[in-house]
Image (spheres, helix red, strand yellow):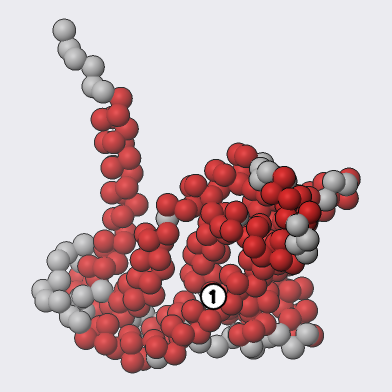
Amino acid sequence: MKKKVPKNICVTLVTSFAALIYFLPVFIAVLNSFKTKGEILASAISLPTSLRLDNYMTVMETADFIHVFFNSCLVTGGSIFLNLLVSSLAGYALARWNSKWSKFLTLLFLSSMFVPFHTIMITLLTTAKTLNLAGHIYGLIFIYCGLQCSIPIFLIQGFVRALPIELEEAAKIDGCGMIKLFGIIVIPLIKPILATISILNALWTWNDYLLPYLILGKPITIPLSQMYFYGQYNQQWHLIMAGFVVSTTPVIIFFVIMQKHIVNGISAGAVKG
């Protein structure tokens, strides 16, 4: 009689195969980043004849990597900080505001998630130019904050509703004001969901190409800096692959370090709420 294969082994095999499929394009990109353009055109899946580290040096010099790296960190960090500030205040207020208007505003925020970006792209760019936000990094930070608020507000609202309100009532009895209560009592309790929001927004902001291109119009962030290697009649694939590796490495490291907070934070905010 044949033995049944344990279920967990089957799951492991399936997930390992799926992970291999997803990792294959990344492996090919890393492989080609060490080749010459001729080697890539000859065979994209063959091993390089030598490890050409000069591809990375060319990318670092041509794309002014240090400068664009700093700009990307500024845009990502600034938009996340501003978004967490606005979303945490709004989510907390909606969670503790027992009114029909609270439900209406929550529904309004959620409905914005279903509006495709391309339908508001022209209007957004026109508004940015009118408010003198176009062409400036601070303008891009403000726009990212606005576009990224809907999901964080929903998650924070659900997380706050699961917190015991007795803690806040006790703090008020002891004479704690709203600002102090929010900073000392609420913020430490909602750290898991804030970490989740930070990770998700960082992945979006760091890798985004379209919005910085529309608002800034200059290759001063990492995704935009890859424009140096694309031409109308010539694509420098060896430099493009090296640029891909250089630009994605920081966010991959950040994700690996912080990924445990994603599932924990989303589960706590969505399920408990």
Q: How many marks?
A: 1
Q: Position of residue 145 (x, y in %)?
A: 66, 70
Q: Position of residue 223 (x, y in %)?
A: 47, 77
| Residue picked out by circle 1 | 77
Q: Secondary structure at mark 1?
A: helix
Q: Residue at x 64, y 88 (%)?
A: 135
Q: Residue at x 58, y 70 (%)?
A: 80
Depth order, front residue of 272/83: 272
Displayed quadrant of residue 39 = bottom left
In the rendered view, does 52 fall on the left or right side of 82?
Answer: left
Depth order, front residue of 76/234: 76
Are there few (<14), some (14-19), or many (20+) residues within 10 Å of tag 1? Answer: some
Q: Quadrant of the N terminus?
A: top left
Q: Amino acid at mark 1?
A: Gly
Displayed quadrant of residue 241 = bottom left
In this view, which residue lies farthest toward the front?
174
